[in-house]
Each structure stands twice: as C-alpha cells, then as structure tokens.
Image: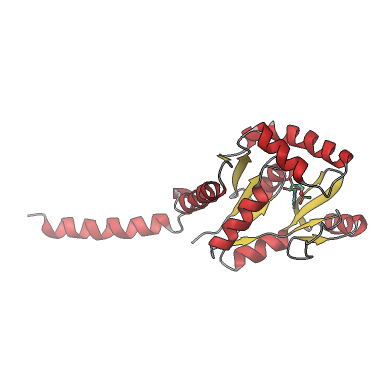
C-alpha cells in the first residue's frame, strides 16, 4: 500500500499539535516527522521526540547540505523537515504526520507532491485568542509575533485540500483519520491498479468466450 505525508497546518493556537498527538496515539499506521528547530526547548520538551533542537549554525549547515525537504523562519526561529526523517517513517510502512507552518507546507509539496494537506481552523476567534494567551511561557513580544503570524496563516487557507474545524478534539481527530483512509483508496494511490483490473478483465473475457453459444 502506498504511504504518503499528511501535513497539518493551523494558525498558532489552532490545536494541531494536540490533534497530531491524539491521532498518533490512536493509529499504528501513522508516524511523526520530528522537525528541527533553533528555538529553545519549552519545559517538558524532549530532544528527538518533540524536536531536534539545534543552534542556528547547525541548522544552516544542514540546510546548505540540502538535508531539508522544506524550511522556514517562524516567529524568529528556524524550523525544518529533514528529508531523511520523512523517508524513515515511510520506509517503516507508515504515513508521515507533519505539523508544519504554511510556508513550509507549500515548499514541502514541491518535494513530495503526493502529500495530503489539511488546514485546522479554530472554532472561533475567542478560542484562538484564549489558546494563544494560555501559553504563559511567552513574553508579550512573543505573543504579539504569534498573533501576527496567526493572521498571515489564516489567509493561506486556500493552499490546502482539506479544512477541519477543531471544535471538539475527538471529532477533529476522527476527521483527519477519515481523510487518511479515503486518500489511501483514492484511485491515483492504489498500487498496480491497471494490473489488478487487467486480470479481472482477462478472466471475464475468457468466461464470455466460453459461455457464448
Ligand atoms: P512551536 O514553536 O510552537 O512548536 O511551532 C511554531 C510553528 O512552527 C508552528 O506553526 C509549527 O507548525 C511550525 N513548525 C514546526 N515544525 C516545523 C517544520 O519542520 N517546518 C515548518 N515550516 N514549520 C514548522
């Protein structure tokens, strides 16, 4: 069965990280692409699980080597998806779930055109603002930067194939799972389709020949 990347994007505070986590806990056929970032770890974040944390110099060196399928500057920090990370997850037979920003999603699709793109919308502006303010680890300037990029990200919704309103976590996770299931059987992704149908046709033709008086 063909495996493909699933890109989840949302304005900051859209809840996509929670959706990605729940989805991964629920389904064995999905793996997570751990991104690289130059931002400092938040309390509780673990290197190589949440992100590969690196210095700006290390990040730039990787980027110059062509190691990233996409990279972008988000709120003053660099973020990127390693090609090797995407290949690693797909080689293990799983679809790759990616939590990346809008600029990265557009670039990524050029490198992996088979990717499915999903935009997560918050149920209301108030919910979005509450989620943004609830992140108490951040200064007022950081919050202002996040508001600004949330605004820009919302304007990019047309770049995505699917849109899910994150009003209730379970339902949103279920919707992403349904998209993955539907995409798995979309005609372009079905492996050896011509061959499978060809064999059926061949057998039917034989039968028609044998039964024709
Ligand atoms: P945070 O610092 O809150 O974990 O993430 C900030 C933003 O960076 C989020 O919008 C997240 O989706 C985005 N992001 C995380 N990893 C990547 C990545 O590998 N590439 C890109 N382009 N954006 C990323």
Q: Position of residue 172 (x, y in %)?
A: 55, 46
Asked if one can make out residue 12 in the rendered structure from this viewpoint, the answer is no
Name the residue rendered at 72%, 36% in the picture. Answer: 129
Compared to residue 180, the image places residue 132 above or below, namely above
Q: Position of residue 201 (x, y in %)?
A: 28, 55
What kind of colouring is applied to the model shown?
Answer: secondary structure
Quadrant hosting residue 53: bottom right
Residue 26 left/right relative to 81: left
Which of the two residues, 196 or 100, is positioned nearer the viewer here?
100
Quadrant hosting residue 142: top right
Residue 62 left/right relative to 176: right
Q: Position of residue 175 (x, y in %)?
A: 51, 47
> Residue farthest to the left?
213
Residue 76 left/right relative to 32: right
Number of on-image labels: 0
Q: Position of residue 138 (x, y in %)?
A: 85, 46
Name the residue rendered at 54%, 61% in the picture. Answer: 26
Name the residue rendered at 66%, 37% in the picture. Answer: 127
> Residue farthest to the right?
57
Quadrant hosting residue 132: top right
Which of the two residues, 123 or 77, is positioned nearer the viewer here?
123
Asked if one can make out residue 78 in the rendered structure from this viewpoint, the answer is yes
The quadrant of the picture occupied by the C terminus is: bottom left
Name the residue rendered at 50%, 50% in the picture. Answer: 174
């Amino acid at each position: 069965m063909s495996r493909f990347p699933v890109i989840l994007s949302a304005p900051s505070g859209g809840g996509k990280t929670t959706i990605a986590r729940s989805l991964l806990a629920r389904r064995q056929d999905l793996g997570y692409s751990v991104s690289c970032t130059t931002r400092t770890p938040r309390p509780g974040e673990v290197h190589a699980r949440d992100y590969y944390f690196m210095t700006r110099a290390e990040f730039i060196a990787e980027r110059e080597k062509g190691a990233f399928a996409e990279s972008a500057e988000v709120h003053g920090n660099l973020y990127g998806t390693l090609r090797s990370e995407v290949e690693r997850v797909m080689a293990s037979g799983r679809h790759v779930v990616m939590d990346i920003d809008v600029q990265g999603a557009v670039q990524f699709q050029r490198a992996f055109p088979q990717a499915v793109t999903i935009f997560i919308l918050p149920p209301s502006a108030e919910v979005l603002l509450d989620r943004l303010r609830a992140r108490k680890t951040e200064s007022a300037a950081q919050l202002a930067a996040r508001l600004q990029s949330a605004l820009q990200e919302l304007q990019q919704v047309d770049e995505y194939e699917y849109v899910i309103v994150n009003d209730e976590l379970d339902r949103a996770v279920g919707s992403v799972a349904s998209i993955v299931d539907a995409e798995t059987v979309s005609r372009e992704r079905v492996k050896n389709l011509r061959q499978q149908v060809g064999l059926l046709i061949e057998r039917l033709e034989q039968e028609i020949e044998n039964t024709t008086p």
